Image (cartoon, rainbow, N blue to C red):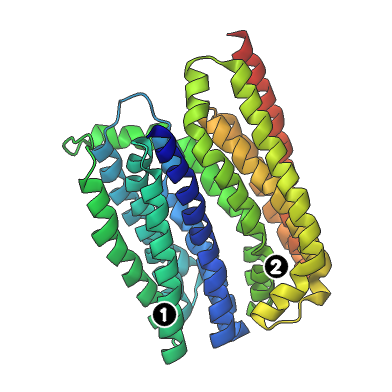
Amino acid sequence: MKETIDKKNVIWNMIGATANAFTSLIFMILVTRINGLEEAGVFTYGFATACIFYIIAVYAGRTFQVTDNTKEYSDTDYIYHRIITCIIMIMAIIVFNMLKGYDIWKSSILILLCVYKGIEAFSEVWYAILQKKEYLYKVGISLTLKAITSMIVLFVIDIITKNLLLSCISIIATNLFFTIFYDYKNIKQVNIIKTQFNIKKIKGIFFSGFFTFFITFLGIYVINAPRYAIDDLSENELQTIFGIIIMPATFMGLMGQYLIQPALTKVMKYIEQKDIKNLKKLISFLIIAILGIGLFVLLIAYLLEAPVLGFIYGVNLKPYLNSMMIIIFGSILYSLGIVISYLLIAFRKTFVQAIIYSIVALLETVVSYILVKKINLLGASLSYTITMMCIAVSFLIYLSYIIKIFSKK
C-alpha cells in the first residue's frame, strides 16, 4: 500500500509540476498569437514580475514547511501566516507600480497577474500540509486541473474579446474556483493541527523562515534581472523575444523539481538518522542526474529549439540561436543550483546562501544593464548564464563543506 502511494505521489507530482510550469509558456504562446508582440511583451514582463512578488506571498515556501520537524508551529499557524503574506504581496505590487510610474493598463495587468499568483501562493500552504501527510498526489492533481483549465479559459476569453485584462480576470476566477471547491475539500479530509491565531507564532514563522524567503526571493530575482534591464533600456518586442527563448529553461528548472521534491522526505530521514553514506549517494545521484539530463537538453535545443519555437510563436528565432544556447547552458546550472539550495534548506543552512545570493544579485543588476545596453538580447543571455554559474559553483562548494562537517558529527 505504501509503495502504491509513493508511486502515485511521484507520478502526480511530475504531472502537476509539469502542467504548472508550462502554464506560463502556453499563456505566452496564446497571448503572442492573439494579441501581438507588443501586448505579449507587457504580459510576459507582468507574469515574470508576478512570479517575483509571489515569493513574498509564499514566503519561506513549501519546502520550509514540509521540512519543519520542530513541531513549534501548527498547520493553522502557517495558514494564518500565509493570509498575511498574501496581503503584503498585493500592497507591495501596488507600491511597485506607483514607483515605476506605469500607465493604468500596464499597472492593471501586473496587479491582476499578482492576484492570480497570490491565490496560487495561498494554495501552497495547503499543499505543504497534504505533502507532509503523504498526499503529494492530491497536490499534483490540483495543479494539473488548475493549469489545464486556466489555459483553456484564457484561450477562449482572449480569442473572443482580444482583451488582455478580461483574460487575466478569467484565470483568476479559474484558480479561485479550484482553490475553494477542490483544495479546500482535500484539506477538510485530513487532520490538521488547529490552534488559535497567535501573533507570537506568526512572528516566529517570519523570523525563522526569513533567510529561506530571502534566498528564494533573490533566486527568482536573478532569473528575471535581465528582464528589468530590457524593460528600462529596450522595447516590449525584445521583452517578448527574451521571454520566448528563456522558456525552455523552464524545463531544466522542472527537472530539478522532479528530482528533489519526492527526495525531500528521504533527505530528512538520512539527516535525522545521521546516515551519511546513503545521504551522499542520494546527493550524488541528484547532481549526476541533473547534469546528464542537461547535456541531453542542450543537444536537443541546438538541433530543434529555433525552428520549433519559431513555428509555435510565429516569430523568426534563427538570429537568436547563440542567445538561446547560452541560456540553455545557464538553465542547467540554474537547475543544479535549485537542487543544492533545497538540500541546504533541509540542513537549515540558509544564512550563507543569503549572502551568496545578495552578492550575486547586486553584481548581476549592474552587469545586466551594462550588457543589455551594449549587446541587447545577447547581453541579457550572458548576464543570466554568468549569474547561474556563480550560484551553482558557490552552492556546490558550500554543500561539500556542510557534508564534510556533518560526517564528523
Identity of the residue furthest to the top in this view: 409
Residue flagged by tag 2: what amino acid is it?
A: Ile
Q: Which residue is mark 1?
A: 167
Whether residue 404 is situated above or below residue 249 in the rendered picture:
above
Q: Which quadrant is the C terminus positioned in?
A: top right
Q: Residues within 10 Å of mark 2 (few under 14, many from 20)?
A: many
Q: Where is residue 115 shown, x and y percent of the image?
A: 37, 65
Q: Where is residue 353 shown, x and y percent of the image?
A: 59, 34
Q: Where is residue 30 shown, x and y percent of the image?
A: 54, 79
Identity of the residue furthest to the left in this view: 196
| Residue located 64% across and 69% down the image | 243
| Residue located 68% across and 30% down the image | 284
Q: Which quadrant is the N terminus positioned in?
A: top left
Left or right for 315, reference 17: right
Count of numbered marks: 2
| Residue located 22% across and 37% down the image | 191
Secondary structure of residue under mark 1: helix
Q: Quadrant of residue 40?
A: bottom right
Residue flagged by tag 1: what amino acid is it?
A: Ser
Q: Quadrant of residue 398?
A: top right
Q: Which residue is mark 2?
A: 245
Whether residue 385 is situated above or below residue 61 in the rendered picture:
below
